[in-house]
Amino acid sequence: MQDLRDPLPLAQALLRCPSVTPNDAGALHTLQQVLERIGFTCTRLVFSEPGTPDVANLYARLGTRGPNFCFAGHTDVVPAPPSSGWSHDPFGGEVVDGVLYGRGAADMKGAIAAFVAAVARLLEQGHPAGSISLLITGDEEGPAINGTRKLLDWVSRHDTAPDMCLVGEPTNPDALGDMIKIGRRGSLSGILTVHGTQGHVAYPHRADNPLPRMLALLQALTATPLDKGTADFQPSNLELTSIDTGNTADNVIPGQVRVVFNVRFNTFYTAHSLEAEIRSRLAKVCPDPARYSLETVCSGEPFLTPQGELSALLMEAISTLTGRTPELSTSGGTSDARFIRHLCPVAEFGLVGRSMHKVDEHCRVDDLETLTQIYHRVLSRFFQIRCQAAGTP
């Protein structure tokens, strides 16, 4: 029988499920079987919304009383096309020279396996004086509509909120112990459409070329930084990602040009105030609102979890087991922590992320073991501290 204290077999089993968003491919069933073996009560939840694919999610809880330590993660992964040049089967879970290969090894099936193994080790010492829960979604790499956000709504209606949550994202840039994420920048995407009048290039006076106007508008958006950053966040950054006229002819003045951009923004702004700043900059260059249009979508506001019990638990465990002092960071992209932060304090710590979303994604087997030890120490110290505070044995 599989030794559940060893994270490697479960990590391999999860990697062998080709769970590319939104397909589960057996990943949650594999995880649920292991969790139920060590005493968790599991609830499978499928959420749907018109125009989006159904997504399977899992909520698991061990124990019924507080305090409740929660782990959150995702079993869905980004695609790994056979033509992309993998040297190992992306869904094979192979170990070669101490390295585990597979899509999701770093992001973040490896961390899920490490946490389950840490719980199994904790239970060898007896049942904790409290609860452990897991929030696992299949919609983190996708639109994030039928995943963690709806799973949290369900938990809020059917169970007690956790006291704190650890997300197993691959936070470390180069080595295990480099970095803990205690917040994330917000993300606002925009589509700027600049309108003109199509015409023949030989008769420009009969047309209105939108491209020069677009250049002036983009200069207004990018010439001056949005801010200088804050004590906890790097400066907000607007990045152009696409410019398209849909024009395939070299002798036609286009009728419009479409620009797509994304802003990763800090707590200097909210999505509302950031959009207002963008519109103000555009209006100064082109006061006529009929000459352009702007659409924006915010996928997450910026947030910061102040240093406290959770970050202290992580820092103590990481420094003890790796000898490193992790940086407390808010860098990088978004994660499902942006939803969880409304429920309880949240931080992120997982494996080395250098290979995530890349060909030959991998993690070191010894890192998987060390991460298990870190998670085990965090859990042990959490329940020990809470018991001492409550005056219980």
Image (tube, rainbow, N blue to C red):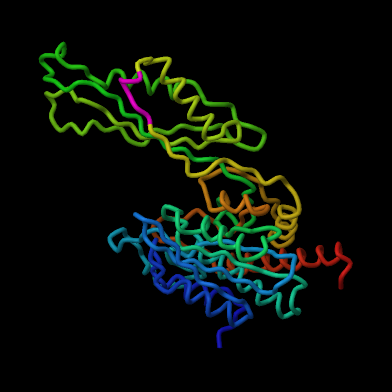
Name above or below for residue 156 compared with residue 181: below
Q: Read off the magenta span.
A: 289-294
User: Residue at coordinates 65% horizontally, 38% vertically from top-left?
Assistant: 232
Q: Is residue 359 left or right of residue 349?
A: left
Rendering quarter of residue 46: bottom left
* Residue 179 in view here: no
Q: Nearer the viewer, residue 203 or 235?
A: 203
Rendering quarter of residue 16: bottom left
Q: Position of residue 49 (x, y in %)?
A: 40, 57
Q: Is residue 122 left or right of residue 267?
A: right
Q: Is residue 375 left or right of residue 102?
A: right
Q: Position of residue 35 (x, y in %)?
A: 58, 77
Q: Quadrant of the C terminus?
A: bottom right
In the image, farthest residue toward the front: 157
Name above or below for residue 65 compared with residue 187: below
In the image, farthest residue toward the bottom: 1
Q: Quadrant of the N terminus?
A: bottom right
User: Residue at coordinates 43% horizontally, 66% vertically from top-left?
Assistant: 102
Rendering quarter of residue 375: bottom right
Q: Is residue 320 left or right of residue 148?
A: right
Name above or below for residue 100 compared with residue 260: below
Q: Is residue 176 magenta?
A: no
Q: Position of residue 316 (x, y in %)?
A: 75, 57
Q: Position of residue 44 (x, y in %)?
A: 50, 71
In the image, farthest residue toward the right: 391
Q: Nearer the viewer, residue 201 or 270?
A: 270
User: Residue at coordinates 30% horizontally, 20% vertically from top-left?
Assistant: 291
